[in-house]
Image (cartoon, rainbow, N blue to C red):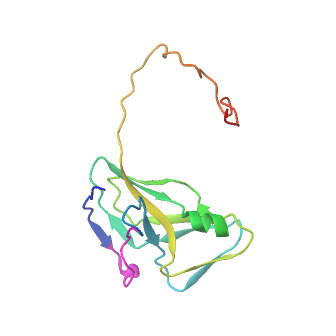
Amino acid sequence: MNALSIPVVQLSHGEGLPLPNYATPQSAGMDLLAAIDGTIKLAPGDRILIPTALTIALPTGYEAQVRPRSGLALKNGITLVNTPGTIDADYRGEIGVILINLGSDTFTIERGARIAQMVIAPCIQANWTLSTSLDATTRGQGGFGSTGVNSEI
């Protein structure tokens, strides 16, 4: 994989926490950690903004996507309200993670807990070309569920 150098500032409430890193050499996402004091209890149905104590300067043409961790989602019902969350190249504020508990039990978040993952990705800005019609396709205007549920095996 190619590496991209991204300036990062760790705010004072993140002191002692490691910077985001990749769990394996071929991981697409790096873990974001909870930069909190003590613990936070997240009751079923509740949501909360968890600070990461990180600010970054992405290069133009890139975004950072904040995504749920699959293990937290499967085992505890913990996911993100807006997923993927997008961090734009011109944003310089602290990265926050909006967690929601869709599980049936209260979930405890501790300082340094791996709460989400962040993927750095190239992005393209589009220019619209106003047209009077679009090219025809087999699917046409078929929307939600129009391609069926089962595969044709």
Number of numbered discs present? 0
Q: Position of residue 117 (x, y in %)?
A: 47, 64
Question: Percent position (x, y) of residue 126?
Answer: 37, 33
Which quarter of the rendering shows the N terminus?
Answer: bottom left
Residue 37 or residue 114, whichever sits in front: 114
Residue at the top extreme of this rendering: 132
* Residue appearing at x 70%, y 75% in the figure: 106
The residue sitting at 62% across, 64% down in the picture is: 73
Q: Is the residue 122 above or below the residue 135 in the image?
A: below
Q: Is residue 150 left or right of residue 16?
A: right
The quarter holding residue 76 reads bottom right
Give the prevailing secondary structure in the magenta stretch. loop
Q: Quadrant of the C terminus?
A: top right
Q: Position of residue 29 (x, y in %)?
A: 43, 61
Residue at 70% x, 37% y: name it. 150
Q: Where is residue 10 drawn, in percent x and y?
A: 33, 74
The part of the chain drawn in magenta is 10-22
